Amino acid sequence: MTRLSDDNLSGSILFEKPPSSAWKMRRRFLRRLLWTRKTGGIGMLIVLALIVVALGAGVLAPYDPADQDLTQRYKPPSETHLLGTDNFGRDLLCRIIWGARISLQVGVMAVAISLLVGGALGLTAGYVGGVVDQVICSVVETLMAFPFLLLALTIITVLGPGMFNIMLAIGLASVPMFARVLRAELLSAREKDYVVAATCVGASHGRIVFKHIIPNVMSSMIVLMTTRVATAVLTESSLSFLGLGIRPPTPSWGVMVAEGRAFLERAPWIALIPGAVVLVTVLGFSLLGDSLRDALDVRMR
């Protein structure tokens, strides 16, 4: 009798599909993501545009974002300055372009910290169970009792302002969400047939977790990471607006809104344009996250 290897038990599908079938599955996924809900395509375009702008800031920005020209203060949008200038004569378009790099960096790094710490806690709680699960759940529930922005504000107050500190504060504030979601997914996946079969053939705990369970809960993690990037961008802008995040003259969207609020009557574009950019960015990540959730959910197919 041929022994069944646990390599054949990874995932809910026990038989390897031919390459053509895998390609068809990818095409169906993209079709569901981009065409079933038109908002998915809009969200992806916004996110891709943000990534291109952030990566190509040095090429796309026509001026240095820190260059000041006091003779060009409060200039409205024109051919020379497409989005106008601020109270120091700095080109608003350049500062928004460089601010995209900062916002994207903060969002991605904060989510990475949340996934690393929260994922470790969720995996431990869901797989080990018992007293360990109870202790971790108690800590997570206590942290979730605080509003997200208040928790991030408390952490950044202790750490102090700065680029690294704001990424760390937002990341740690998101840890309870990642831990709770991953624990719930792990508890559900742990009872699946392919996990039980892998256990029966003698697979180690590490192999079961990293080869069988994690790949099958990644869809939920991808959706959560996408939506939390939007939350991180909005939180960074809020903290910078309050003077607890990125410090001037670094071009941050929240700093630009804070600096422009004093000139709403004289030069409203200084505050309104960066605020609109934050709105569109958060909307893009939210639309993409919602479409990913529907595309990856088997019940929605």
Image (cartoon, helix red, strand yellow):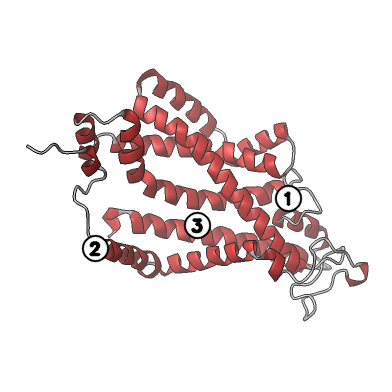
Sequence-wise first label, 2 or 1: 2
Q: Label 2 amino acid?
A: Ser
The label shown at residue 21 is 2
* Residue 234 in sight: no
- Quadrant assignment for the N terminus: top left
Residue 123: percent from the left, percent from the top?
40, 32
In the rendered image, is residue 199 in sight?
yes
Question: How far apart, in angstroms, are the residues tagged by discs 3 and 2?
Answer: 30 Å
Instruction: Give the left or right position of residue 62, taking residue 106 as reference.
Output: right
**Quarter holding residue 61:** bottom right
Q: Judge from the rendering whether residue 45 lies leftward or rightward of residue 207; answer left or right.
A: right
Q: Amino acid at mark 1?
A: Phe
Q: Residue furthest right?
A: 71
| Percent coordinates x, y for residue 182 in the rendering | 40, 38
Report which residue position mark 3 lands on. 286
43 vs 105, left or right, is: left
Contact flag, marks 2 and 1 (Cβ < 8 Å) = no
Up the image or down, 94 lies above or below 13; here it is below
Count of residue discs: 3
